[in-house]
Image: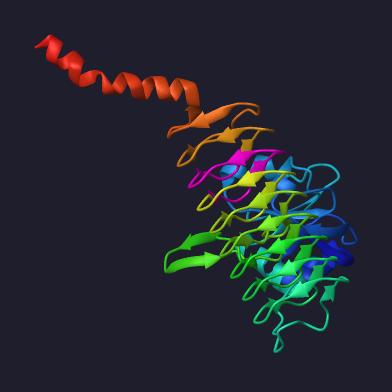
Amino acid sequence: MKFPKTHSLKEIAEIIGSEFVGEENFPILGMNEIHVVEPGDIVFVDHPKYYDKALQSAATIVLINKEVDCPDGKALLISDDPFRDFNKLTNHFRPFTFSNVSIATSAQIGEGTVIQPNCFVGNHVKIGKNCLIHANVSIYDHCVIGDNVVIQAGTILGADAFYYKKRPDGFDQLLSGGRVVIEDNVGIGALCTIDRGVTGDTTIGAGTKIDNQVHVGHDTVIGKKCLIAAQTGIAGCVVIEDEVTLWGQVGTTSGITIGTKAVVMGQTGVTKSIEGGKTYFGTPIEESREKLKQLANIKKIPEIIEKLK
């Protein structure tokens, strides 16, 4: 998430009430999670296991809960609770804004687009030309939808990320300030849920078609011309490259990559990154031919046992 204007290190420190290390006029352009940070961004880290990763990332400002040596060309924000203070920044720069109308006055809707009854279109949403949004679709604030997009009834774009920190008295949610971006010629089925990024974008590439009751987690990037069948669950921070096919009830773990033109058969659990151009099946996932051979051999076990007797 980029800020509306450049802020100084001192200004950001004052917003969250933290100390800082670096020049007080050090420029800050935005904030992001570690997998999408760029120079000028703030990244937060609150566990020693990830200190080095954060300090050596592309981010030039690190919100951290320990005084450490500051790398050259970077700045630090010292906080007793970086998770809490990252939420403060999200709430400051992209707060929840109440709406009392079905289609926000700040929404931009392109020529030829049809929005059926009982839809909600939030603040600063952008919808392109010749789209068809069926009844009871909810499009949360800041979502971006391209041209010629069809969204079936009951789908929700832009719900909060499923991202929590365990505390002694329960769970704290990491606030979501990101967006959902739907490119041109995408089709989305009924009752799908596509979560927005925590600070970045959840993206559905041009020409991709999604069946009913599919879930897409936060910050996931789906490529162009993919096919995703019903009841598939895609975790957060997944990269699905172009022309991938996921058949029904596929589930993925987070943070993996599915290569270009991969085909994943139904009910497969994608527990690791997989190469493109191959067909996969099963849990744990393997190339489908190998997996089917294994299953055929398993069927022979009773016969083998009888022979051994």
Residue 245 screen position, x and y as percent: 61, 39
On the rendered image, what quadrant is the C terminus found in? top left
Most extreme residue toward the top, as rendered?
Answer: 308
Asked if residue 245 is among those painted magenta in the image, a careful observer would answer yes
30 vs 45, nearest the viewer:
30
Residue 230 screen position, x and y as percent: 53, 52
Give the colour scheme of this rendering. rainbow
Q: Answer whether residue 178 is visible to the viewer in this image.
A: no
Q: Report the side of 38 relative to 49 (left or right).
A: right
At 85% from the left edge and 74% from the top edge, which residue is drawn? 108
At 66% from the left edge and 41% from the top edge, which residue is drawn? 240
Q: Report the side of 238 relative to 126 (left or right).
A: left
Image-quadrant location for residue 186: bottom right
Most extreme residue toward the left, as rendered?
Answer: 309
- Start-end of magenta stretch: 233-256
Main SS of the magenta segment?
loop
Q: Answer whether residue 249 is visible to the viewer in this image.
A: yes
149 vs 156, nearest the viewer:
149
Asked if residue 99 is among those painted magenta in the image, a careful observer would answer no
Residue 88 screen position, x and y as percent: 68, 70
**Numbered-mark total:** 0
Residue 251 screen position, x and y as percent: 50, 45
Image-quadrant location for residue 126: bottom right
